[in-house]
Image: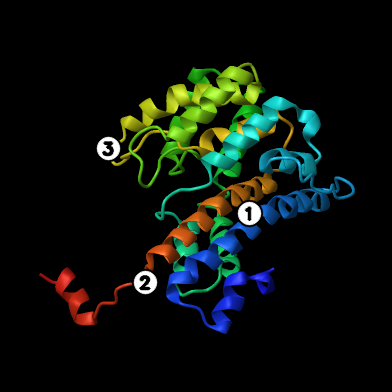
Amino acid sequence: MQKESTFAHHYEDGINKSEYWRYTLEDALNIIAKLPAIAAAIYRIRYDKGELIQPDPDMRLTDDFVHMLGLEASGEEFLKLMKLFLVAHSDHEGGNVSSFTSAIVNSALSDLYYSISAGFNGLAGPLHGLANQEALKWVLDVMKKYNGTPSKEQITELVNETLASGQVIPGYGHAVLRVVDPRFEAFYQFGTLHCPEDPVFKTVIHTFEVVPEILKSIPKIQNPWPNVDAVTGSLLHHYGLREFSYYTVIFALSRSIGLASQAVMNRALGTPIVRPKSVTTSWLKSQVIK
């Protein structure tokens, strides 16, 4: 799609810096408008869901996305979940791989198609956009081990064994946050309202009631609280979206809104190219040899 970049065409023709934001905004609107259909096509082609479903110009973005997925029959609750998902994952300031990568590439005046695709490549990493899949897999493995929703006592036993073996509990801890992720709270409340008896979500509840207290007892752990990835997979699973590898595509669709918005602001503010600081060997020696 990069050949369609309005910014790239106008930059080649020569434009004033004060106009950079305007054509970045054009690219942003075009990208955000087209990505739901692309993401839905990926779902239907990759998982053999049948013919592509054409967009409905009278629908809002999320409604149309669910329509093109072919999941309208999942009901109003699933639509509400998708709206929450696309809003909650859209922006995450600049301190994460996808946002930071996109901002760096865009700071070189690479157009938004290049910039967002770079951010998506970072999002595909297991430590970033794949995290909710891994958290859900852990929950399902726990349920398989105990033949259903485990008790809090069983989860306590398993968590202690997991930590003793040097492994982590997927979905717990965050590099920046030192409180319960507010996005986790929003999805947790959604699940409590709409599917409190779902066995997978109940396992998430029991885990939340147990894990933080265990992690608090470990001095080196600074954040014992769950992040958003600890809960989102269980809700997607509840509504029948069980193609786990697709979860990151939905994440990318959401994150594109934040990446595009940040790029428009950065071009409007005239932020310079990102140039990481370099240091000399002498400086490095001075830091380690006292």
| Mark 2, residue position | 272
Q: In the rendered structure, which amino acid carries the disc numbered 2? A: Pro
Q: Quadrant of the C terminus?
A: bottom left
Seen from this angle, which residue lies furthest right? Answer: 51
**Depicted 49 relative to depicted 7: above or below:** above
Is residue 149 found left or right of 222 in the rendered image? right
| Coordinates of residue 44 in the picture (x, y in percent) | 81, 48
Is residue 179 found left or right of 206 in the rendered image? left
The number of callouts visible is: 3
Tell me the mark number nearer the camera, choosing from 1 and 3.
1
| Mark 3, residue position | 219
**Depicted 273 relative to depicted 46: above or below:** below
Is residue 49 found left or right of 185 in the rendered image? right
Reading the chain from its start, which is encountered first: label 2 or label 3?
3
| Coordinates of residue 77 in the picture (x, y in percent) | 68, 25
| Numbered disc 3: secondary structure | loop
Q: CA distance from mark 1 to mark 2?
A: 25 Å
| Mark 1, residue position | 32
| Coordinates of residue 43 in the picture (x, y in percent) | 77, 49
Mark 1 Cα within 10 Å, few/some/many (few <14, many 20+)?
Answer: some
